[in-house]
Image (cartoon, rainbow, N blue to C red):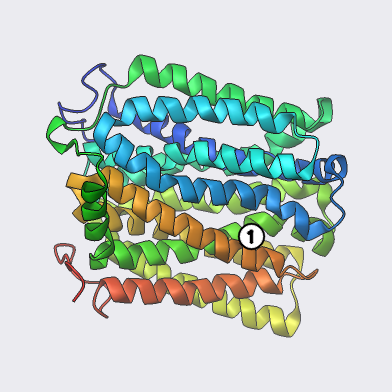
Amino acid sequence: MLSPMPPEAGTRSAIGPREFVILMAALMAVNALGVDTMLPGLPAIAKTLGITTANQQQWIITAYMLGFGAMQIVYGPLADRFGRRPVMLVGLLLYVATSLIASFANSFTTMIIARTLQGMAAASTRVLTVSMIRDCYSGRHMARIMSLTLLVFLAAPIFAPSIGKLILLVAPWPVVFHALAAFAAGLAIWLSIRLGETLHPEYRRSINPRAILSAAKIVVTNRLSVGYAIGHTMTFGAMLGFVTSSQQLFTDVFHAPDSFPLLFAFVALSMVFAAFVNSRIVLRFGSRRVSHSALIGYLLIGGIHLISGGIFGDSLVSFLLFQFAIMFCSGLIGPNFSAMAMEPMGAIAGTASSVQGTLSTLGATVIGITIGQSFNGSAVPIVAGFFLCGVGALAGALFAERGKLFRPQHAEPGPLQ
């Protein structure tokens, strides 16, 4: 059973918890669709824009993520001052406009600029969705809602490449951007009709620089916030490295270009499964026990894959099985690390989500660029990237918990000392 939303939330409309989860998931999906829908179309886009180097086409994804990461720091303070709902609506409308601009790009430079702006617009959906969930839920209930939201949201990476492929069968690649614009416009209408303001009136904050810096200082001096944001950055970065390289990986290494949407969907399905499992067990076992166990599994699977791949090489089947397993663990780590990083930040949820999101996304994008640009015609850079990022995530968790994993759920390490 989903817990009811508190009376302060959704005051303008009577949205129920199930619709709330679906709406939050759809808003989060704006970003995922902006990345994954066009993966099958990258070769066609590259041909139209005159891109001759295979790794260069990855910048169509990377530019979006850089814009997505850089702009998050802006949306949080705006949402803490003016409310979540109006800022989200503006972000969605900007996403519609920038998607249309990208569809008319006739040069690589224009495409990169349009994609950066599109990512900047999409940043609103990441920051404000997390903020709205934190407005309405806390603790294990927040972790469960995050998992249920991710359960719906993660259908996007499963179906997005297939949607993109289907569009490309009947229309040129600009229509992919038209579809993204239509999706965002539909969400703006849904949000404006059904969801009221979730920000509690007493939590509205001034937009002056001193207030923003004061809130940001709280975020970057709290062990839970810093440590788990680092952990999430590492696992997210590994995933981005896989996503940006995936079209080349399945085409050039495993020689299965026609099966790319299906193979990508198989890997993404692991995270849906993980989100479902997490939603069922997190209230019983707690975020720490679940995520720390998953992190150990992540490291073991990554290490075994790296060693076995180095000795025996990777077949398509072995790579898919290892990737499914490690992404399952990542799906258990992500929502719990995010929830634990946000747990002490209730009074400044918007700014906290902005700061954490900006640092995490920019850091993950740099990691993803490093892994993606290391693609050398084999799966080794991706496999090594996952293992090394797992080590980094472990370091973040140990920092957050003062060197001790599996602490009781009530233990809340405070400011850095």
Q: Which residue is mark 1?
A: 242
The front one of 282 and 136 is 136
Residue positioned 39% across, 48% down in the render: 73
Residues 364 and 358: in front is 358
In which quadrant of the rendered view does residue 307 lie?
A: bottom right
Position of residue 142 measured from the top left corner of the image (x, y, whole percent): 26, 46
> x and y percent of residue 413 in the render?
18, 68
What's the amino acid at mark 1? Phe
Q: How many marks?
A: 1
Q: Is any part of residue 292 visible from this angle?
A: yes
Residue at point 18%, 76% (across, down): 417
Q: Is residue 209 left or right of residue 200?
A: right
Looking at the image, the residue that sits furthest to the front is 209
Q: Residue at x 16, y 38 (%)?
A: 203
Q: Where 34 sits versus 259, above or below? A: above
Q: Nearer the viewer, residue 378 or 348?
A: 348
Q: Residue 137's x, y, as percent? A: 22, 41
